[in-house]
């Protein structure tokens, strides 16, 4: 019987799906329009579509699916759109204004201080309750927990119908006892509440960031529980029917609809603790996992307990998929560019590993959870071209999205987008997804001409200007992730993927001086492919600030963190001998305010272990900032956080090789394309190209999910893994 693993990445415009046959290694890809009103609809349609495509002449049932891995933007979109309501906060007595005080930093520097208006807090001060009791920085109790005040706070939230509550007490990273007692009170007095404790979400010091991170987790938890539970139920319902004929698909859709309606009816009960969430991903026999921001995956049943870890799951999967593809082709260090319909996500991979950060943010909310270091810019295929009050042409960050979409979609869109500019200039075909979505070139032309008339340019210069602005927007994001972090962008090839990722690579090579750009096969599905390359991973942290770390203390803390990691991996079904633990530590020089993270060796903790960690810190500090105090006794080193990542390794899909063939392939057609001027450009079908094929611009290379416009003066060469490497001729 066939066994298939499926990855589903839901984006703002398209839902990308990849299926890998675990017996043959065959990879099947497809795309379907996203359904922003209910992302689960696009998810299920994508699963059905990829199974039909993978089946060929056979019938493939959902029973053949051994696992589903999902990259979702549900939590991200909720935060970016500020859809946060009825959120409560419990903190230590006397610290009720911690959110109001926040940090002294002002966006865009201190020159903005006179004009900047403090945005609304994630929880207004009138929905903050305080509870007596105090711990010191070592976790020792200074004043006992005030249960009477805790009961009053719980009842206050209950009486006002506030069901999502974050709890953050001073120094609970050192001792979680008071927060755990607060949870017991809330469970007893306000059983409908969904509660997030800072000692569970982020056991790390810095009270403001810990408070906001905990509150973000509480804010998205009800939404994620409903979404994941609904998807699990629909997958289970689909598993009882075949994916074959249209009649079977209709019956399957009806079963899913009933499941979706049931999930909607139970919306309220989905927020009441953990009774229903336990079925998410485990109710059916099919393992269902969700991508996390840290570069790992976690079962849906577990991820509903820590939904904040999913906030950048889609972009994280893309960076990991691109890293594997690039490393296989002999490029261990690359820049990754994921161009979608709404935005472009950029990351850096060094020696096969994407850079991580704990200083990230989602919208205006700092989130100190470990996440792949990704810079996002509003420059996608659906980015809208508009005229500023000063009369200048701008592009993005607002997007036409999937509905109504660009003018050329013919769905009622009224504004010119980047995609319309490409269509007008002939750089993309008059259809998407191999003809599944026809494009209205006349609507794009009329929109470009109208915009050109307003700014006094020719239609060609207007369309080319839209693309040039979009390319510079993308290049600024690339500089932010490289130059601002001390990396020379000219040292890194770039992997361009996503539906719109390859469209501007020739201009990015010129703007940034990139040595080359790698365009993988099926670039529109790299993020979904990345979902199937990711290990199960959980992160654990403990703040322990000291200038002289006792090896006994370090052994105790690492032992506790590794114990937590082992329990989580056991729940995920990994045998004890398959567990992998990756240690790291955050250190700084005495007097510094922020830390540098370095990997810590495995094995016994002795003086050699300590010396190795300190040596790595001095080396990394010099690499990042250009100086260090390795041999200066006046500048001691302070240990701040100890960390453990618990990893459950999976078997990654292998990337097949292409046969060699004609190095000078013949085009399949030609059409008028505007680069510097209008001219006939050969059109190549990517699926017809073989290893060693070399195409010289001007040309256009088309495939199912994306298009590569090859400008004059550039070449594209296919390597043995099917990647197109674009260079200046």
Image: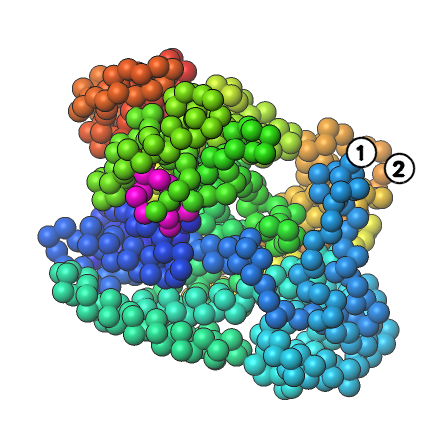
Q: Residue furthest left?
A: 57
Measuring 37% from the left and 25% from the top, which residue is drawn there? Answer: 725
| 523 relative position to 385: left or right | left
Measuring 52% from the left and 79% from the top, which residue is drawn there? Answer: 272
Question: Which x, y percent locates residue 511?
Answer: 51, 21
Q: Answer yes or no: do the residues labelled 2 and 1 have beta carbons within 8 Å?
A: yes
- Can you tell which quarter of the image residue 162 is in? bottom right
Query: In the image, which residues are magenta?
Result: 401-411
Q: Is residue 62 above or below residue 270?
A: above
| 386 relative position to 639: left or right | left
Question: Which x, y percent locates residue 561?
Answer: 63, 62
Q: Is residue 238 visible?
A: yes
Where does the C terminus fall, quadrant-wise? Answer: top left
Q: Which residue is mark 1?
A: 629
Q: Residue furthest right?
A: 634
Question: Which x, y percent locates residue 130?
Answer: 77, 74
How far apart marks 2 and 1 lie (CA) works out to 8 Å
**Disc 1 on helix, strand or loop?**
loop
Measuring 36% from the left and 56% from the top, which residue is drawn there? Answer: 35
| 132 relative position to 406: left or right | right
- Can you tell which quarter of the image residue 498 is in? top left
Q: Which residue is mark 2?
A: 634
Where does the N terminus fall, quadrant-wise? Answer: bottom left
| 518 relative position to 455: left or right | left
């Amino acid at each position: 019987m066939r066994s298939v693993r499926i990855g589903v990445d839901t984006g703002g415009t398209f839902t990308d799906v990849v299926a890998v046959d675990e017996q043959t290694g065959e990879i099947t890809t497809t795309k379907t329009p996203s359904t922003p009103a209910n992302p689960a609809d696009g998810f299920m349609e994508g699963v059905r579509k990829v199974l039909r495509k993978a089946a060929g002449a056979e019938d493939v049932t959902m029973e053949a699916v051994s696992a589903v891995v999902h990259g979702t933007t549900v939590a991200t979109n909720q935060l970016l759109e500020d859809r946060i309501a009825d959120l409560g906060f419990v903190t230590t007595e006397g610290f009720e204004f911690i959110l109001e005080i926040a940090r002294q930093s002002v966006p865009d520097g201190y020159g903005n201080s006179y004009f900047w208006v403090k945005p609304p807090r994630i929880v207004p001060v009138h929905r903050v309750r305080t509870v007596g009791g105090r711990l010191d920085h070592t976790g020792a109790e200074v004043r006992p927990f005030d249960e009477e005040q805790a009961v009053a706070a719980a009842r206050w939230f209950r009486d006002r119908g506030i069901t999502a509550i974050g709890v953050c007490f001073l120094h609970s990273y050192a001792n979680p006892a008071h927060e755990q007692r607060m949870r017991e009170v809330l469970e007893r007095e306000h059983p409908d509440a969904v509660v997030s404790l800072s000692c569970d979400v982020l056991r790390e010091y810095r009270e403001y960031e810990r408070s906001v991170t905990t509150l973000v987790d509480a804010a998205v938890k009800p939404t994620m529980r409903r979404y994941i539970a609904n998807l699990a139920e629909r997958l289970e319902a689909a598993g009882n029917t075949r994916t074959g004929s249209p009649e079977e698909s209709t019956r399957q859709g009806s079963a899913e609809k009933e499941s979706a309606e049931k999930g909607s009816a139970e919306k309220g009960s989905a927020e009441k603790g953990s009774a229903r969430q336990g079925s998410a991903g485990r109710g059916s026999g099919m393992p269902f996992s969700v991508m996390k921001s840290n570069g790992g995956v976690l079962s849906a049943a577990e991820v509903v307990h820590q939904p904040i870890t999913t906030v950048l799951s889609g972009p994280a999967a893309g960076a990991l998929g691109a890293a594997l593809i690039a490393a296989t082709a002999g490029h261990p260090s690359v820049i990754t560019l994921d161009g979608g319909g709404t935005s472009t996500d950029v990351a850096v991979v060094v020696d096969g590993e994407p850079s991580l950060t704990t200083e990230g943010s989602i919208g205006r909310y700092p989130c100190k959870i470990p996440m792949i270091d990704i810079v996002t810019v509003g420059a996608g295929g659906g980015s809208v071209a508009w005229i500023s009050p000063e009369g200048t042409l701008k592009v993005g960050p607002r997007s036409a999205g999937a509905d109504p979409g660009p003018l050329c979609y013919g769905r009622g869109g009224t504004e010119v987008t980047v995609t319309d500019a490409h269509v007008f200039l002939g750089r993309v075909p008059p259809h998407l997804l191999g003809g599944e979505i026809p494009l209205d070139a006349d609507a794009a032309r009329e929109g470009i001409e109208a915009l050109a008339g307003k700014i006094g340019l020719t239609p060609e210069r207007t369309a080319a200007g839209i693309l040039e602005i979009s390319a510079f927007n993308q290049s600024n994001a690339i500089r932010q992730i490289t130059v601002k972090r001390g990396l020379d962008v000219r040292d890194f090839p770039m992997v361009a993927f996503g539906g719109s990722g390859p469209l501007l690579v020739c201009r990015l090579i010129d703007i940034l001086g990139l040595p080359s750009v790698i365009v993988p096969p099926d670039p529109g599905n790299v993020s979904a492919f990345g979902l199937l390359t990711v290990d199960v991973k959980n992160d654990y942290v403990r703040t322990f600030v000291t200038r002289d770390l006792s090896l006994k203390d370090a052994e105790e803390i690492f032992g506790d963190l590794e114990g937590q990691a082992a329990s989580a991996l056991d729940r995920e079904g990994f045998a004890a001998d398959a567990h992998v633990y990756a240690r790291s530590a955050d250190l700084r020089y005495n007097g510094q305010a922020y830390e540098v993270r370095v990997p810590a060796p495995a094995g016994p903790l002795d003086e050699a272990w300590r010396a190795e960690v300190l040596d790595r810190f001095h080396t990394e500090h010099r690499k990042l900032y250009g100086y260090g105090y390795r041999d200066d006794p006046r500048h001691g080193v302070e240990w701040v956080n100890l960390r453990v990542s618990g990893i459950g390794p999976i078997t990654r899909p292998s990337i097949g090789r292409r046969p060699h063939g004609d190095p000078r392939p013949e085009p399949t057609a030609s059409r008028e394309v505007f680069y510097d001027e209008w001219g006939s450009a050969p059109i190549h079908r990517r699926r017809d190209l073989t290893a060693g094929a070399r195409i010289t611009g001007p040309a256009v290379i088309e495939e199912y999910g994306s298009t590569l416009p090859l400008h004059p003066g550039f070449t594209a060469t296919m390597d043995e893994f099917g990647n197109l490497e674009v260079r200046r001729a």
